[in-house]
Image (spheres, grey):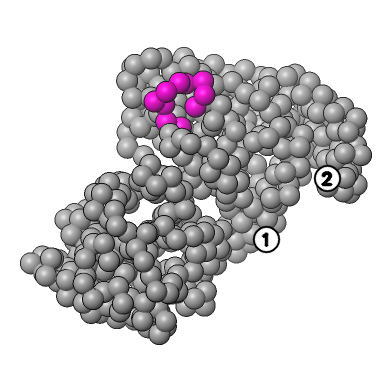
Amino acid sequence: MGEVGAQFWREHSRNPSLQDMMLDSNAQLLSQEERPEILELLPLLDGQDVLELGAGIGRYTSVLAEPARHVTAVDFMESFVEQNRRENGHRDNVAFLQGDVTCLQLPGQSFHLIFSNWLFMYLADEELRALARRMLSWLRPGGHLFFRESCFHQSGDSPRSFNPTLYRTPAQYNQLLTGAQETLEEKNWGFEIVFSRSVQTYVKRKGNRNQVCWLLQKGQRIQTGPRGCTTFQQFLDSGQYTERSIRRYEWLFGTGFVSTGGLATTKVPGQGDSGDRRSMDVGGWGMGHGCWHMRGRRGFGVKVLGMDLSHNMVELALERAQQEDNDLVEFEVGDVTRRSFPAGSFQVLYSRDTLLHIADKGALFRKFLAWLKPGGQLLISDYCCGPRPWSEAFTVYVRQRGYTLLTPQEYGQALQEAGFTQVQAWDRTKRMALALSEELQELERNRQDFIQAFSEVEFDSMACGWREKQARCLDGDQRWGVLYAKKPQ
């Protein structure tokens, strides 16, 4: 941790209390509300071996130990360790260690979960990179790392004579943690993002979206993914959805949208008037404008969760959310194929032109079915394909993009096989072709404005891309499908 960090915590550990741990005068209320929220985000702990880094006075040790087989609680400050021991020493499945995590040595593949709350922000970049590699080695294959940090700026109101905290951006944490790799038995392993999201207690109580938590999973890395990327998130954020690419799409589609037609081709099913109303958008609303659209259509009391694997997308959504006085719309960086929610969590699930990236759509649809309430609704629009065989140009395009495409009819059949009822599958390629034509005309009419905002090279690339999409639709290779289905009552 370094001498400066050690001095800071010596100053704030003289009286090992909850307020000293959280550095906030409202610590009691915040802890009471955030602890169940955090615990709900963790994977199942029954019978698991857990490593808790930065355990402090044991605010989470006790609740981790209840279901877990064993918890190893580690903290740098001896006074915190002793307080934790006083609180939880009666538990025979908890071991207490005092030590600096930057020097910690533990057996490989010893834990199912590593849990850390407000620790990494006190480590320098190189210290965190080294720790990330060691944490990767301590986890069993498929194991998880959960951590939570203060991003951008200070959150607690306790006075501090000095502050060594590094208030990183979420993107910096993503880069530092997912950059870790381990080679074991000629296989490469790394951290994959399951989700990253703001702690809602702080949004509700402080209007603060800068308390961010992550769940990462240890997974096997392919040697070379699409365009040489080792993770799919890296593929998205370094290619199609760089910040500049997103802003080009918005220029054409409208603020908050990255799909052809923008708001004009957006349609969200009604939810009815009874029961707990909660919606989730899976990667379909770009920077969140559609989430606010869903929220606005639903009226007071409806919660909307917007999820996208592209960190660039969600970061822009969060930036814009700061201007909204509303805690009913949440955003998270998330991998829907790794994410889990309790059964019956949502009344509506919506996805706009994003599931083309998912290979095993049947497995995803079975998840969707479980997450929906009885009678819940699913609406999907997505890039589809025409009957095979495809043209050589379209085959190359799909391979380069890493897409897995179905015909609209195959999409509908997959939904039926997953257990959905009232399935309707529409081929809306003509609507897509019309939108493409209108957008290309708009682009060409405003050529100079676009070039002034971006560049002539980018104009030529956009115009060429739109003409290629038009040609693929005309040839019958590329289709646009809209799917609707319901979960049985």
Q: Can residue 356 be seen in this view?
A: no
Q: Mark 1 points at which residue?
A: 228
Which portion, as a residue range, is magenta?
A: 295-304
Give the spatial CA distance, label 1 vs label 2.
30 Å
Q: What element carries label 1?
A: helix
Q: Where is residue 353 in the image (x, y as percent from the top left)?
A: 62, 33
Q: Does the magenta stretch include residue 301?
A: yes
Give the residue displayed 40% in from the left and 78% down from the top: 5
The circle drawn on residue 412 is none
- The residue under label 1 is which amino acid type? Gly
Q: Mark 2 points at which residue?
A: 453
Q: Dot 1: within a 10 Å radius of its alpha carbon, few (fewer than 14), some, or many (20 or more) residues?
A: few
Q: Between 288 and 65, which is closer to the camera in this rendering? A: 288
- The residue under label 2 is which amino acid type? Ala
Q: Position of residue 248 (x, y in %)?
A: 76, 42
Quadrant hosting residue 108: bottom left
Q: Which of marks 1 and 2 is nearer the N terminus?
A: 1
Give the residue displayed 38% in from the left and 14% down from the top: 273
Q: Dot 2: within a 10 Å radius of its alpha carbon, few (fewer than 14), some, or many (20 or more) residues?
A: some
Give the residue displayed 73% in from the left and 32% down from the top: 253
| Position of 354 relative to 152 (above/below) | above
Q: Between 481 and 170, which is closer to the camera in this rendering? A: 170
Q: Position of residue 126 (x, y in %)?
A: 52, 77
